[in-house]
Amino acid sequence: MTDSAALYLPTDWRDFLSLTKPRVMSLVIFTGLCGLLAAPGTIHPLIGFVAVLCIAMGAGGAAALNQWWEADIDAGMKRTAKRPIPAGRLRRTDARDFGIALSAASVGLMGIAVNWLAAIILAVSIVYYAVVYTIWLKPRTPQNIVIGGGAGAFPPMIGWVAVTGHITLMPVLLFAIIFMWTPPHFWALALFVQSDYAKVGIPMMPVVKGEASTRRQIILYAVLLLPIAAAPWFIGGTGAVYGAIAIALSLAFIALAGPVALRRVGPNADGSDRMKPEKRLFGFSVLYLFALFAALVADRVIYGQGLLS
Ligand code: HEM
Ligand SMILES: CC(C)=CCC/C(C)=C/CC/C(C)=C/COP(=O)(O)OP(=O)(O)O
């Protein structure tokens, strides 16, 4: 792929926006916002807004760096081939510079306007996603998303620390929830796009260990997620409203993961959608996290702790 200016300019701002993976990052930003709203203590609304903006900028910058690094891989997969770099709408170096600038600005602004612990955790999560996951783990091991998934688990902790200035058990539990949620979220999707990953040589779990093993691991993580999702209530960090919603959502998650785990998918003789249970589980995984973190904030509102000053 050439980097000729004549081929790429003028650049559309929408291509830069799409570099930030806005749809995926909407949930990252939402969990960060909920961490901030659920934390005990108060924060000025403007500072709170800046903190969430920094999480959005950092996540977007890291996503741009991910696409800068993976341009060739993205070009080889149907799902990603139309992204701005592989489609030839954006120079690779521009994506890199945009990613670095956005990431650096997010950390600097967080440190100056909010606090430096939140800025450090934000910096760690950017490096974790853009370097540890994207460059190091993803092309090497089928455990890539189990370990690398940690990157996406930081935002609620960042939101929380933006308010409190220190790490306690609650933000660690919020981290653990997303950490445990990521494998079933991603492997459900990987089961129906695995041919794409196999084509470009990315060792995702279904490609390396096979479908049966991936399905077993999906249910394992889904079951483990239940006590972890309910833990904030067990330790007295939330009220029963959150506890009840967390348990109900987690049971529904297990109920949808069960059929995925038990399936032995064969030829699609009846013409039905072969991967319907997997697609349903993936869709519900997104809803699950939105609802769980919304419940955390609702619980705070009901029991009257925290929230903006
Ligand atoms: C290493 C961990 C993860 C991997 C490999 C992963 C992978 C993916 C992939 C490949 C998609 C398909 C859609 C797309 O590419 O736009 C997707 C969708 C999505 N992911 Fe993840 N994900 C991970 C973690 C997370 C985290 C931590 C969050 C948020 C907290 C998240 C939120 C979402 C959302 C909201 C969608 C749906 C986007 C849409 O509707 O188009 N993911 N994920
Ligand atoms: C604050 C901060 C830095 C947050 C980072 C949040 C984070 C790590 C989210 C991960 C979500 C994501 C886009 C995974 C895609 O995996 P992939 O890149 O392997 O997917 P692809 O195949 O679509 O490129």
Image (cartoon, rainbow, N blue to C red):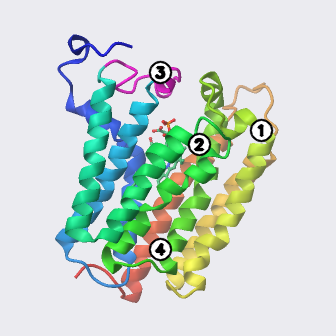
In the rendered image, which quarter contains the C terminus? Answer: bottom left
Name the kind of residue labelled 1 in the image: Lys
Q: Position of residue 41 (x, y in %)?
A: 32, 85
Residue drawn at x 53%, y 59% is: 288
User: SS for tag 3?
Assistant: helix
> Which tag, 2 or 4, sits closer to the chain's start?
2
Q: Position of residue 127 (x, y in %)?
A: 43, 50
Q: Which residue is mark 3?
A: 75
Q: Are marks 3 and 1 in contact (CB under 8 Å)?
A: no
Q: Which residue is mark 4?
A: 171
Task: State which quadrant residue 212 falls in.
Answer: top right
> Which tag, 3 or 1, sits closer to the chain's start?
3
In the image, 276 versus 218, the foreground residue is 218
Q: Are marks 4 and 1 in contact (CB under 8 Å)?
A: no
Left or right: 179, with 126 as reference point: right
Q: Tell me the distance, in whole angstroms, between the alpha carbons under discs 3 and 1.
A: 25 Å
Q: Are marks 2 and 3 in contact (CB under 8 Å)?
A: no
**Few, some or many residues within 10 Å of mark 4 (<14, 14–19, 20+):** many
Marking on residue 209: 1
Q: Tell me the distance, in whole angstroms, between the alpha carbons under discs 2 and 4.
A: 25 Å
Left or right: 204, with 158 as reference point: right
Residue drawn at x 34%, y 80% is: 164
Q: Tell me the distance, in whole angstroms, between the alpha carbons under discs 3 and 4.
A: 38 Å
| Between marks 2 and 3 in the image, the one whose residue lies nearer the viewer | 2
**Few, some or many residues within 10 Å of mark 1 (<14, 14–19, 20+):** few
Q: Position of residue 10 (x, y in %)?
A: 17, 20
Q: Which residue is mark 2?
A: 137
Q: Tell me the distance, in whole angstroms, between the alpha carbons under discs 2 and 3.
A: 20 Å
